[in-house]
Amino acid sequence: MDNNPKFKGKGFVSIITNCKGELLSVSAQFFKKRNPAFEKELVEYFKLIELWKPGTYYKKEVDSGRTYSFKVKKGELILY
């Protein structure tokens, strides 16, 4: 986002982790205005996080998926 500080938009990032907390899959998408370059940058950022907390089901660690909403305002990423 450094190359376009005026860009703004909203979207989501989806991740899938295994029972060991390892990232299996990550994808990002904006709702209205697509920005493939930023979506790719966001995916690469999430891949840098090496260990995630695995999901649990009946106190047993399991593969799981999560979705995070985000917005970009004045070139700054905000997860919520």
Image (spheres, rainbow, N blue to C red):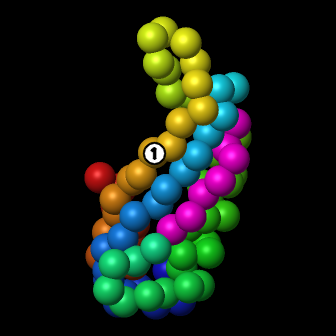
- Camera-side residue of 71 and 25: 25
Q: Mark 1 points at which residue?
A: 66
Q: Residue furthest top?
A: 59
**Number of other residues with Cα within 10 Å of mark 1, as a class: few under 14, some 14 to 19, many 20 or more:** few
- Camera-side residue of 48 and 11: 11
Span highlighted in magenta in the image: 22-28
Q: Can residue 13 be seen in this view?
A: yes
State the image quarter where residue 8 is shown: bottom left
Identify the residue at image location x=40%, y=64%.
Answer: 12
Identify the residue at image location x=54%, y=75%.
Answer: 39
Question: Is residue 72 found left or right of 55 in the rendered image?
Answer: left
Question: Is residue 31 found left or right of 16 in the rendered image?
Answer: left
**Predominant SS along the magenta part:** strand
Q: Is residue 74 visible?
A: no
Question: Is residue 6 found left or right of 52 in the rendered image?
Answer: left
7 to 56, vertically: above or below: below
Can residue 39 be found in the magenta stretch?
no
